[in-house]
Image (cartoon, rainbow, N blue to C red):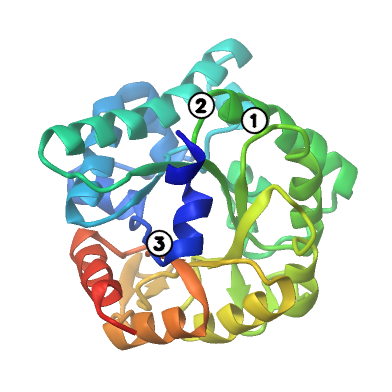
Amino acid sequence: MTSDSSLAAALAAGTVVLDGGMSNQLASAGHDLSHELWSARLLVERPEAIVEAHLGYFEAGADVAITASYQATFEGFARYGIGPARTAGLLARSVESAREAARRARAKGVARPLWVAASVGPYGAMLADGSEYRGRYGLSVAELERFHRPRLEVLAAAEPDVLAMETVPDADEAAALLRAIRGLGTPAWLSYSVDGRHTWAGQPLEEAFALAADVDEIIAVGVNCCAPEHVEHAVATAARVTGKPVVVYPNSGETWNAATRAWEGDPTFTPDRVRAWRDAGARLIGGCCRVGPTAITSISATLAESP
């Protein structure tokens, strides 16, 4: 891509629509995601399903597709007998699947710019035990950097438009990621998972966002996979602390009941909230868990309105 069509240039000009949750899109198509590899398993078994999920979001109005590599790691795949060379190929496939969806969307008449964000999930996602909502893994920043760097290198080599370092629960892990992206030549965004005004590990958001303020590779900072009601404060804080564009893609607002294994309550992700996020400084807006194509169409329509 030329600099004029880069995602960073688009953010300087206005707002950009992200996609919604990959898992709910795949589940709605009938795919079983109960495996520890979650959606990354389909990179191995049903890559066409990944392409179709991305395509659905592009057709719904998303400008950016986030790849199915959130839970795709060398260590995670190794537990299921998949070696380093094949894992690298699967990581590259995640980027190519999103690119293929963009090609199909254009063939169907979608004329706007479309971008690919390569998902980089936290260390806790590889553990598949909910640690990405706690942080504090007992590892040093250097150890976390060594975990993340090989995957980042492979994803960057696949030439996504941006690296989406997402659902980061801990400022220590953010520090590791910010070190690990040095020299890759690919822009990135950093997105925390939060609980109110703190990361899930308990650090104040002011301190967490400040880590990225002077990192040239970071083109946006923000939050994802959190309750919609926690977003507005995070947007204002990220914009004030870093001066960078802000990225937000929260969950629907429903609550998961682990005992009944069912979602409960009503969605709290509304157009009024989207307007408030935009007005507070958000420039990349989409959804995470339980946010599907219909919601993305609504976001797109809301952001098309005059402020």
In the picture, the disc for residue 151 is 1
Q: Which percent across, then down, holds residue 272?
A: 31, 88
Look at the numbered discs 1 and 2 and tell me whether their residues touch, using CB distance below 8 Å.
yes
User: Mark 2 — residue?
Assistant: 91
The one nearer the camera, 157 or 192, is 157
Left or right relative to 254: residue 109? left
In the image, residue 283 sits, relative to residue 110, either above or below, namely below
Circles 2 and 3 in contact, beta carbons < 8 Å: no
Ranked by sequence position, the earlier of labels 1 and 2 is 2
Does residue 131 lie above or below 182 as drawn? Answer: below
What is the distance, in whole Å, between disc 1 and disc 3 at their CAs?
22 Å
> Which quadrant is home to the C terminus?
bottom left
Position above or below: 39 against 300: above
Q: Residues within 10 Å of mark 2 (few under 14, many from 20)?
A: many
Side (left or right) of 291 relative to 178:
left
Q: CA distance from mark 2 to mark 3?
A: 20 Å
Q: Amino acid at mark 2?
A: Leu
Task: Identify the residue shown where x is 29% and y is 80%.
Answer: 267
Find out whether the residues at labels 1 and 3 contact each other: C-beta distance under 8 Å: no
Q: Amino acid at mark 3?
A: Cys
Q: Quadrant of the N terminus?
A: top left
Please, what is the three-letter code of the amino acid marked with disc 1? Answer: Arg
For mark 2, give the secondary structure: helix
Q: Residues within 10 Å of mark 3 (few under 14, many from 20)?
A: many
Residue hosting label 3: 288
